[in-house]
Amino acid sequence: MAKKLVIVESPSKSKTIEKYLGSDYKVVSSKGHIRDLATSGPLGLGVDVENGFKPNYIPIKGKSNVIKELKKDVKESDMVYLASDPDREGEAIAWHLKDALGISDKNYKRVLFNEITHDKVLDAISHPTMINDDLVKSQETRRILDRIIGFRLSKLLQRKIGAKSAGRVQSVALKLIVDREREIEAFTPEEYWKIIAVFSDYEAELFKYKTKDIELHNEEEANAVLKALGEEYTVESIEKKEKKRKSKLPFITSTLQQEASTKLGFAARKTMSIAQKLYEGIDLGNETVGLITYMRTDSIRLSDDFVAPAMKYIEETYGKEYKGYVKSTKKKENVQDAHEAIRPTSVLREPTKVKQYLSNDEFKLYSLIYKRTLASLMADATVNQTTIVFDNHDYKFKTTGSVLLFEGYLKVYKDYESSEDKILPEIGEKEVAKTNNVECTQHFTQPPARYTEAKLIKELEELGIGRPSTYATIIDTIKSRDYVTVEEKKFHPTSIGVETTDKLQEFFSDLINTDYTRDMETDLDEIADGNLVWNEVLKKFYDLFEPRVKDAFTDMEKKAPEETGEMCPNCGNPLVIRKGRFGEFVACSNYPECKYIKKEEVKVVEVCDCPNCDGKIIERKSRKGKLFYGCNNYPKCKTAYWDKPIGKDCPECGKMLTEKNDKIKCSECDYKEE
């Protein structure tokens, strides 16, 4: 009988940790959250607003059996180690486990696994702590805030304009996208001209007349300059400087998402999913080990246990001159800064050494994290920059070149940063260069660029909105709600996205904005630090918010449903598009007097032969509108797949092969087609 029980969130993590701890420990998984707010009570909030915002928690659907099994494990154990993830959400999960499983104070310990390696896991088990109630209250407050705002505003918008949802951070992120689109629409391009003197191996651009910067607004002004120029360009000054090029800081959650987006083309959701696997443990043949530290962090700190061997590795691999320094920042520390930056768990696990055990995407992300961390500890690169200014009848032309003198950190990070040399010819002051090749080109100023995922994440982080760990979910939500479309990796708001933002700003402009959302994040941090009382923060918010919602239910104009141009065959009134639980449908505008609903003509799309009968696998939709693939002989034949079957048998088990995101795998066994 196991006397010591360890409860983690992830099943894959539990397997890795159990190997480290041995037979005295049993390691099980809660599979994430086990409870959430109920949807009962006044307004369906699951919160007793009148009784100090007391939450009413119930098991998440499908988790009752998990709780039952965990209670059995707890009963058979003398000590329970609650080892959910080392962040606020993980702290809340630990508290929910303790509360729901009836674990007494003397029979539990809180354990934080910042990295899943043998030594660190054993060290964490031998240095347990207790649940931090302030962190739990901070996360609980966040959940209640999101529930109140989400439920109340979503119901309002669904009833008034047919929008799907609203949220505390989601709606602010959408507003940023809508505001940027309006900036673009309102932008008036301004004409300007460039004049460039082209020499045999370099170019020089006009930038001044005498001592003043010059701007050419039209062709007439540009031609006047061309007329005044001669063939000779006299060197007026040469400035040579050695400049240091510093490496970037090691990754935190938001910068990892940004860099993976711009350098690898990964969506934020994909980045976090792959990072989770790298953190939880990879089978390297002779051991299973986490390759990176915990990936939800705001800290750039690197532990001494990592820095010392990393510095030794840099010196032995690249030379003493490549050793750099540990970077620091004056950024205000918060609770998650107790963690380290995202880094490899061992500097000796070079990407090429573990490549055979990783998928292509896992290798790409691990390489990025490994090289970024190592580069952050390496010496600055040194660049020799030369600037030459030419004079031509008081018109000043400038050219700049640079030569990399010392690679420094670029020795390992050059795949992710450009470092091309631009060499200028050796030339002395007062020397004269000649050319008749002068380019004069028309240009127009450009509007601000639309947000990409990386730029939106950066903006949210800089504004102090939300938590980096939630950015992937926020982006997924505004896309799945059809509030935005993505074209050439840029966000474009849809008409319903714009309308949703406009209605929220009409009635809640002082609540759904960057300042208020940022200030609320500060309050949540203060709760986590024990400086604010959680339900007092909620009361202050609710007393401001709820009267506004009630006013909006009364004053917000209801959007008339869109007419189809057809008339109802039963009563002659126009048919309109309505929205229901499972999507849009066409019905009579005279409802409820007339309950006519137009039956949708279903187009049958055959995919392949059914492997279990003489029927066909066709595209179908579940009750909730989700696409799946099932036999047309249902209910006689219940063959069905969530992923698209391709009509071929698995070479290992003979079952149907399916396709998703251009990847082919078996519908039954673990076979995957490389």
Image: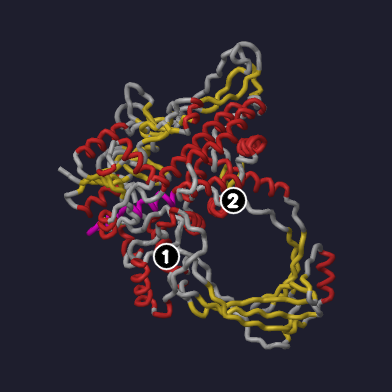
Q: Which residue is mark 1?
A: 373
Which residue is nearer to you in this view: 346 or 57? 57
Magenta region: 270-287
Amino acid under disc 1: Thr
The correct choice, above or below, for 376 with respect to 584 in the image is below
Decide if residue 30 is on the left or right side of residue 598: left
- Mark 1 crowdedness (10 Å alpha carbons): few <14, some 14-19, many ≥20: many
Taking the spot 21% from the left edge, 46% from the top edge, the residue there is: 4
Taking the spot 54% from the left edge, 48% from the top edge, the residue there is: 465
Q: Position of residue 118 (x, y in %)?
A: 26, 58
Q: Position of residue 565 (x, y in %)?
A: 66, 23
Q: Is residue 585 magenta?
A: no
Q: What mark, if any, has residue 451 been given in the picture? A: 2
Classified by dominant secondary structure, the portion drawn in magenta counts as helix
Helix, strand or loop at label 1? It is helix
Q: Is residue 275 magenta?
A: yes
Decide if residue 196 is on the left or right side of residue 284: right
Q: Position of residue 657 (x, y in %)?
A: 33, 40
The correct choice, above or below, for 350 with respect to 69 in the image is below
Decide if residue 520 is on the left or right side of residue 320: right
Taking the spot 49% from the left edge, 54% from the top edge, the residue there is: 254
Q: Residue 579: name its quadrant.
A: top right
Q: Residue 104: name its quadrant.
A: top left
